[in-house]
Image: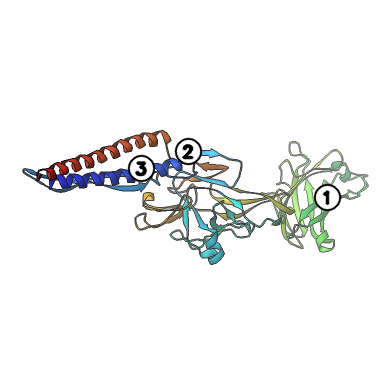
Amino acid sequence: MTISSSLAAGITGLSANANRLSTISDNIANSSTHGYRRMVTDFHSLVLDSGPGRYTAGGVRTTSQRLVDESGALTATGNPTDLAVRGRGFLPVTTSSAVDTAGVDGDILLTSTGSFRRDDAGYLTTPDGQVLMGWPAAADGSIGTVPRDSATGLVPVQIAANQVSGSATDAITLGVNLPASETQDGAAGLPEVMTTDYFDNLGTTRQLGMSFTPTTPAPGGAATNEWTMLITDSASGGAVVGEYVLSFDDSRGAGGTLSAVSTNFGGGYDPVTGQLAITVAGGPIDIDIGALGSRGGLSQLAGPFAPISIDRNGAGAGNLTTVEVDADGSVYANFDNGAVQRLYQVPLIDVANPNGLMSQDGQTYSITEASGPMLLWDAGEGPSGDIIGFAREESTVDVASELTQLIQTQRAYSSNAKVIQTVDEMLQETTNLKR
């Protein structure tokens, strides 16, 4: 039995080292594969029977495991949608075939990195067919309440190539100086007129007409330091949308600043924020003319009528130029009109035991009982890492270490073959006893 068990042990040794050779060869073959996590083969002794005066060789068995919890170094690329996870967590993806056949209900896979680019349908897809998944944003860019313990709510990230965007103006800041001489005795009392553009809800450029009419004093009277501001809207056929009486301070230290604003028509004025609210054809717009007693905004100083600065938000219609992903997983579309629109948020999936995930093609993984259930996190929150654009994760394989193990495996394999050869020779000697 001892000789026979030695033969069996030698055979298990050959098999074990062949298994180790398989993982080593796979590791070396994928040493340049982005996102590849190396495999390891562990050896475990088998004890069959032993006791005083006897021993039976049990041999060895192996277990192979992919070290998914190890991560490789990140390298920079030139593609903004080359993504890599820095830290804990995985990107949710699905296969392009699942999107074609199941729509948004395809199976969810996990990956740590990917080179995503828009395909002919606008999906962010890797060359081997992995489609990035995310939560869709509302029109205002917000993400609603979404489940955190399942993939329900995740959809393929799709960005149309011919997408056009425009955003309405809802805030304007005016910096205008009104000539103080026009409110003094003998002034002509003629209005000062200007226009400023804004963008409506369809991205069309509209105009607000603004006139400032001074209040002139009676002959021989003191300066009034008062103006009437009239605002009209071109989108409303030139209708008046606001009328305000502006009073300015002429005291030392506060000279030229607003001292009071009264409303004849339109939305009220907030003396703290310095904003007055008007309503144009497309909706409300807040106009910042300056808080009472503050410098900036509207002023009345000696000198000519001068629109000093006019700022507004919003943008006209523009075409999609680039797509980028922030560290928190937000997918933004950039347009040639300067507008930036949040379209999706890509979460990071975390599991209790990453090494329990089942390996799939293309450096992707699927959930198993050994891995534990998935939890979805906003990137950078909780235990999760963040998402890095313009980057890929390198393989975790150290080629020098693998070649060293390859030499060891070859020697061990040869030694086990030698054991089998020796057992064969001993059995042959036993057979020769009969001659």
Dot 3: element: helix
Outermost residue toward the bottom in this view: 102
Residue denoted by label 2: 73
In 3D space, how far apart are the residues under numbered discs 1 and 3 (Cα atoms)?
89 Å
**Horizontal and vertical percent for residue 432?**
13, 43
Mark 1 or mark 3: which comes first in sequence?
3
On-image quarter of the C terminus: top left
- Report the mark closest to the observer, 2 or 3: 3
In 3D space, how far apart are the residues under numbered discs 2 and 1 (Cα atoms)?
66 Å
Instruction: Kindly identify the amino acid type of the residue bearing the numbered disc 2.
Output: Ala
Q: Which mark is residue 227?
A: 1
**Horizontal and vertical percent for residue 270?**
69, 53
Question: Callout 2 environment at 10 Å: few (<14), some (14 to 19), or many (20+)?
Answer: some
Q: Which mark is residue 21?
A: 3
Instruction: Kindly identify the amino acid type of the residue bearing the numbered disc 3.
Output: Leu
Judge left or right: residue 390 versus residue 264. left
- In this orientation, which residue lies closer to the viewer: 154 or 244? 154
Mark 2 or mark 3: which comes first in sequence?
3
Judge left or right: residue 268 versus residue 416. right
Dot 1: element: strand
- In this orientation, which residue lies closer to the viewer: 64 or 124? 64
- In this orientation, which residue lies closer to the viewer: 236 or 383? 383
Residue at 88% of width from left, 41% of height from top? Answer: 181
Mark 2 or mark 1: which comes first in sequence?
2
Would residue 326 be seen by someone viewing this image from the given angle?
no
